[in-house]
Image: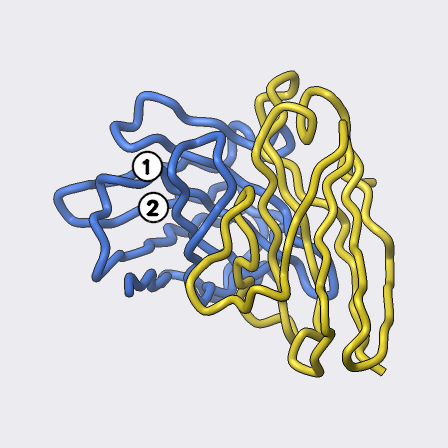
Chain colours: A blue, B yellow
Amino acid sequence: EGQLVESGGGLVKPGGSLRLSCVASGLKFDDYAMNWVRQAPGKGLEWVASISVRSDYIFYADSLKGRFTISRDNSKKTLYLDLSNLRVDDTAFYYCATSEAVRRPPDSWGQGSLVSVTS
Amino acid sequence: QSALTQEASVSGTVGQKVTLSCTGSSTNIGSYFVGWYRQVSHGPPRTVMLGNSLPSGIPDRFSVSKSGTTASLTISGLQPEDEGDYYCSSWDHSLETRLFGGGTRLTVL
């Protein structure tokens, strides 16, 4: 069964930047669209961004557009999320997830990476 | 406020049948597959239904239906391990975004 492992989270000050990575193993990474979904403490799931297999379709949550950038490297079986100009309310667990296509629901999920934005 | 509306909480006893609903519109649930996810103690989400498909390891007491712009997840023969927070999700072609419902807390009494 495939596995997704996120990394790159940590403590960052408001206005700072961070790069999250999600490495896939045991699955054919370039068969799947990929997604980032986050969850703030005590809150529900919030979709962040999605990217198609060849990166020709990329979508973002409106509230995050311009600050977050999703990308992927199929040769490295790795999904990325670049976060910039971070705010306190970006504090959350960030999960990566596969899907059959960008508009299909997420399927397999990683364990998550915690981003804490605090002064 | 989520564009997909779920009950805040649902409860049932062991062995009972419960149904969770997810209400949206023609631009999301009415047009696309719906995913259902369970989360326990804020661990990672686990997919319990993708469209009409049961992922590997999910028991067949889980089933789904859709009527117009409302999707439903039914659990027949409720078990203690079914307890958790359940979220629905759908793509929306008008907003070109993915939506999640606010979540339903399922309690097994």
Q: Amino acid at mark 1?
A: Ser
The residue that appears at 30% across and 28% down in the rendered structure is A55
Query: Circle 1 sits on which residue?
Result: A71
Tell me if residue A119 can be seen. no
**Which of the pair B61/A108 is nearer the observer?**
B61
* Chain letter of disc 2 in the image: A
* Chain letter of disc 1 in the image: A
Is B12 drawn above or below residue B3 in the view shown?
A: below
Disc 2 to disc 1: CB gap under 8 Å: yes
Tell me if residue B33 can be seen. yes
Q: Specify whether disc 2 shares its chain with disc 1.
A: yes
Left or right: B41 in relation to A52: right
The residue that appears at 35% across and 30% down in the rendered structure is A52
The answer to which quarter of the image holds residue A34 is top left
Left or right: B30 in relation to A85: right
Q: Quadrant of the N terminus of chain B?
A: top right
Specify the farthest residue to the top. Answer: B94
Q: Position of residue B103 (x, y in %)?
A: 75, 55
Left or right: A29 in relation to A39: left
Gap in Å between the C-alphas at discs 2 and 1?
A: 5 Å
Q: Secondary structure at mark 2?
A: strand
The residue that appears at 84% across and 79% down in the rendered structure is B13
Is A89 drawn above or below residue A57 in the view shown?
A: below
Specify the farthest residue to the left. Answer: A75
Could you classify mark 1 by the number of other residues whose Cα lies within 10 Å: few (under 14), some (14-19), or many (20 or more)?
some
Q: Earlier in the sequence, mark 2 or mark 1?
A: 1
Q: Position of residue A69 (x, y in %)?
A: 42, 35
Q: Position of residue A87 (x, y in %)?
A: 62, 48
Query: Circle 2 sits on which residue?
Result: A80
Q: Position of residue A21 (x, y in %)?
A: 33, 54
**Which of the pair B98/B38 is nearer the observer?**
B38
Q: Amino acid at mark 2?
A: Tyr
